[in-house]
Image (cartoon, rainbow, N blue to C red):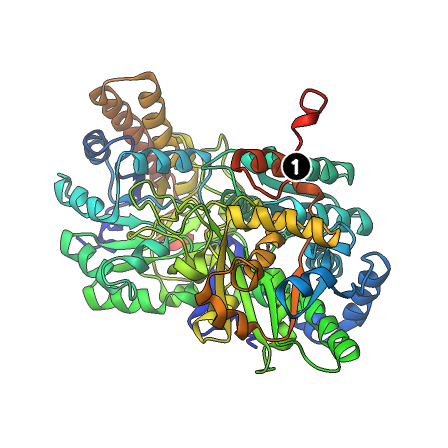
């Protein structure tokens, strides 16, 4: 199933977890729990040692995952070991993609990702200006390249990104780094408005932590929601308290379901499509 | 020299999307104010460098070093710049530019604390609020500079992630910038980061070589045979080299921190050195493609140097390119050699250098000193007759750690402090 198809039947719920957090085996269980909770696409983080776009929650997840031995090679094994049927997007930083294999650019990484069944990439430190080599490799192997649009992105830059993006566009809900928030930013609405003329699914992320947020964002016109830190918080707490991975997986599934239901409820409250545009 | 941000394959702009508009805005300001002197920006900058910064700095002949190394050794005295290091050239330039751009808040990262101190001073001078990120470990190594930043009214935010050095402080400052990008300027401390920073910082630091070149003509009637500077990110290096790059008769030496060894522990992800020009490989970090200390997979390694200002896993893209093309020679000096040079310069010339700077002098000793191995003759010859060493900063900030490190390492030319034990 392609990334766009995942948006066909209503709002898509796109959870994120760092692969291998806090360890390989538990992490497999956690990712599978997200699918049971209603995930339509899963963003899997391949940890990089300098995650500049990440707030403390995901930063710490990255540290746990790296300490448990996660590497690009292990990551691809992880994807193969996963028992999920929804499409997977690999979220990582450009240096890992660039260095993989023969160290001469992104092609070997993309080839391997396609081989294990990954459908696309999100690369937070790769702006459209520098993305041609990765875009070409993605085209060659039929993968999508998701770009982030920030509240500050406008004009020519927005145009350039929207020409390059495929799968879905990641609408960054507010300035700053990732991290769960207690309220929804107003910046989301104006970002969605700016994107309304583009014909690609719009998924909103950064700060969503509850079913209410999800509902509110989808009601405002988002085609999907991306949730990372709120889920990673559950993994972190379970790890700190020494909880059984099965219990932690149940908690993840519960929050996933709440988020998915919030999104569905938001969609049902939207004005009919013709009035929205 | 590039204005499009690419130096061969190096450079570029690899940053989160939220920062891209700010980087475009900065690039536009760089071209207008710095390159085209719009509104007399560069005149204002030069006047402030003179009156506030204490420029020009002397190009001083070092008599005892000249004798020791059998050639004319001249010192470009950046340690005499206000604040005690070349860092003020860049900090003043960027803070002033931020004012011209109408920014309301300054953030910066610092390793040795010299850049933080320079930024704090420039911000007090230009009346703009400032917050500085500094690794916890560096805070412990550089307490006097932490105090100086606070004295000048800046806030210092400790960074505890990772090993708590410069690399983590840069990441943390980028996070702040991504959050507050609309009214905040990030004063990056070296010729690193996304375009236009590497070019812009080089241009602000180029005053070093501009003066040195003129002074060499005035004092020697010719250009130097070699210029030697220490390289962390590479800002004093690029500043000292910039105006000589086209002068083929002048050799350029970038001296990196060899740390305790050039061997790398891949398993532990640790490089016990900061020699990214000598041992690094190509990759993307903190906004630029450049040479990095990284493992096989592309994870960035923890670096090490006795001097916190050199303790960084990357290096400026332009310097990496100049080394690749053979215009600049990259060499390295280990912790012990640097510490010994720190004592030697203090004893022979009455100049206590920064531990960073001491690396540059360590190289002279390595190839041209009385105990230099016989096979270094050729390298010594390559330095030529007239050598300029860039004294990037003074060592006051390093006294605490120099005392500690000296005794841990048994540096044989160090002063004997035993008679004072208990009294100190
Ligand atoms: C005195 C001094 N020299 C050199 C450096 C290294 O930086 P760069 O290579 O950018 O000049 C520092 C950094 O803090 C410094 O304080």
Q: Give the residue pinned by disc 1.
A: B156
Up/down of A275 relative to A102, above or below = above
Quarter that holds the C terminus of chain B: top right
Would residue B384 appear left or right of B257 to someone viewing this image? right
The residue drawn where x is 33% and y is 33% is: A64
Q: Residue furthest right?
A: B51
The residue drawn where x is 60% and y is 57% is: B361
Residue A125 screen position, x and y as percent: 42, 55
Residue B158 visible from this viewpoint: no
- Residue nearer the viewer, B424 or B298: B424
**Mark 1 surroundings: few (<14), some (14-19) or many (≥20) residues within 10 A:** many
Up/down of B424 relative to A192, above or below = above
- Residue nearer the viewer, B311 or A115: B311
Would residue A42 appear left or right of B175 to someone viewing this image? left
- Residue nearer the viewer, A58 or A74: A74
- Residue nearer the viewer, B229 or B16: B229
Would residue B214 appear left or right of A169 to someone viewing this image? right
The residue drawn where x is 78% and y is 76% is: B219
Residue A20 screen position, x and y as percent: 26, 36
Quarter that holds the N terminus of chain B: bottom right
Residue B113 screen position, x and y as percent: 65, 44
Residue A74 screen position, x and y as percent: 20, 44
The residue drawn where x is 63% and y is 68% is: B70
């Amino acid at each position: 199933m392609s990334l766009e198809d995942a948006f066909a039947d209503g709002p898509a719920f796109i959870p994120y977890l760092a692969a291998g957090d806090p360890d390989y085996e538990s992490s497999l269980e956690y990712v599978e729990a997200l699918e049971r909770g209603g995930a339509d696409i899963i963003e899997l983080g391949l940890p990089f040692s300098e995650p500049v776009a990440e707030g403390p929650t995901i930063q710490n997840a990255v540290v746990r995952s790296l300490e448990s031995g996660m590497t690009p090679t292990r990551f691809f094994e992880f994807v193969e070991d996963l028992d999920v049927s929804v499409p997977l997007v690999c979220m990582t930083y450009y240096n890992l993609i660039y260095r993989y294999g023969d160290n001469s650019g992104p092609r070997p990484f993309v080839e391997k990702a396609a081989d294990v069944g990954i459908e696309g990439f999100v690369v937070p430190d790769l702006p459209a200006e520098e993305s041609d080599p990765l875009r070409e490799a993605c085209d060659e192997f039929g993968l999508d390249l998701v770009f982030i649009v920030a509240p500050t992105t406008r004009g020519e830059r927005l145009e350039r990104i929207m020409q390059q993006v495929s799968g879905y566009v990641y609408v960054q809900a507010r300035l700053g780094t990732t991290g769960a928030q207690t309220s929804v930013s107003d910046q989301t609405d104006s970002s969605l408005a700016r994107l309304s003329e583009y014909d690609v699914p719009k998924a909103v992320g950064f700060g969503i932590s509850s079913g209410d947020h999800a509902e509110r964002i989808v009601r405002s016109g988002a085609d999907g929601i991306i949730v990372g830190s709120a889920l990673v918080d559950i993994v972190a707490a379970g790890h700190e308290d020494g909880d059984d991975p099965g219990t932690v997986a149940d908690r993840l599934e519960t929050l996933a379901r709440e988020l998915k239901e919030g999104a569905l409820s938001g969609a049902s409250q939207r004005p009919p499509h013709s009035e929205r545009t | 020299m590039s204005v499009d941000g690419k130096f061969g394959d190096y450079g570029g702009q690899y940053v989160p999307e939220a920062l891209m508009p700010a980087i475009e805005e900065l690039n536009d300001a760089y071209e207008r104010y710095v390159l085209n002197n719009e509104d007399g920006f560069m005149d204002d900058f030069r006047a402030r460098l003179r009156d506030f910064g204490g420029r020009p700095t002397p190009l001083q002949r070092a008599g005892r070093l000249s004798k020791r190394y059998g050639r004319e050794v001249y010192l470009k005295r950046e340690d005499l710049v206000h604040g005690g290091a070349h860092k003020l050239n860049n900090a003043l330039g960027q803070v002033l530019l931020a004012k011209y751009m109408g920014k309301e808040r300054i953030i910066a990262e610092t390793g040795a604390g010299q850049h933080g101190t320079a930024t704090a001073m420039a911000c007090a001078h230009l009346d703009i609020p400032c917050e500085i990120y500094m690794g916890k470990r560096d805070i412990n190594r550089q307490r006097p500079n932490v105090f100086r930043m606070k004295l000048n009214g800046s806030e210092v935010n400790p960074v505890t992630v990772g090993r708590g050095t410069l690399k983590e402080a840069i990441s943390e400052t980028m996070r702040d910038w991504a959050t507050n990008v609309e009214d905040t300027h990030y004063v990056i401390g070296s010729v690193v980061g996304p375009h236009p920073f590497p070019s812009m910082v080089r241009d602000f630091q180029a005053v070093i070589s501009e003066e040195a070149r003129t002074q060499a003509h005035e004092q020697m009637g010719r250009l130097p045979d070699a210029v030697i500077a220490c390289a962390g990110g590479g800002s004093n290096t690029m500043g000292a080299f910039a105006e000589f790059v086209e002068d083929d008769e002048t050799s350029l030496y970038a001296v990196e921190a060899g740390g305790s060894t050039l061997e790398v522990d891949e398993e532990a992800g640790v490089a016990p050195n900061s020699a990214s020009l000598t041992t690094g490989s190509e990759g993307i970090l903190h906004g630029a493609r450049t040479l990095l200390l990284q493992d096989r997979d592309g994870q960035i390694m923890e670096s090490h140097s006795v001097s916190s200002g050199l303790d960084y896993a990357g290096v400026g893209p332009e310097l990496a390119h100049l080394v690749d093309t053979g215009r600049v020679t990259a060499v390295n000096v280990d912790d012990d050699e640097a510490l010994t040079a720190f004592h030697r310069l203090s004893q022979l010339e009455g100049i206590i250098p920064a531990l960073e700077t001491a690396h540059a002098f360590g190289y002279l000793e390595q190839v041209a000193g009385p105990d230099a191995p016989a096979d270094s003759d050729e390298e010594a010859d390559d330095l030529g007759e007239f050598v300029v060493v860039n004294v990037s900063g003074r060592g006051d900030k390093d006294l605490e750690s120099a005392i500690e490190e000296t005794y841990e390492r048994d540096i044989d030319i160090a002063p004997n402090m035993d008679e004072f034990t208990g009294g100190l």
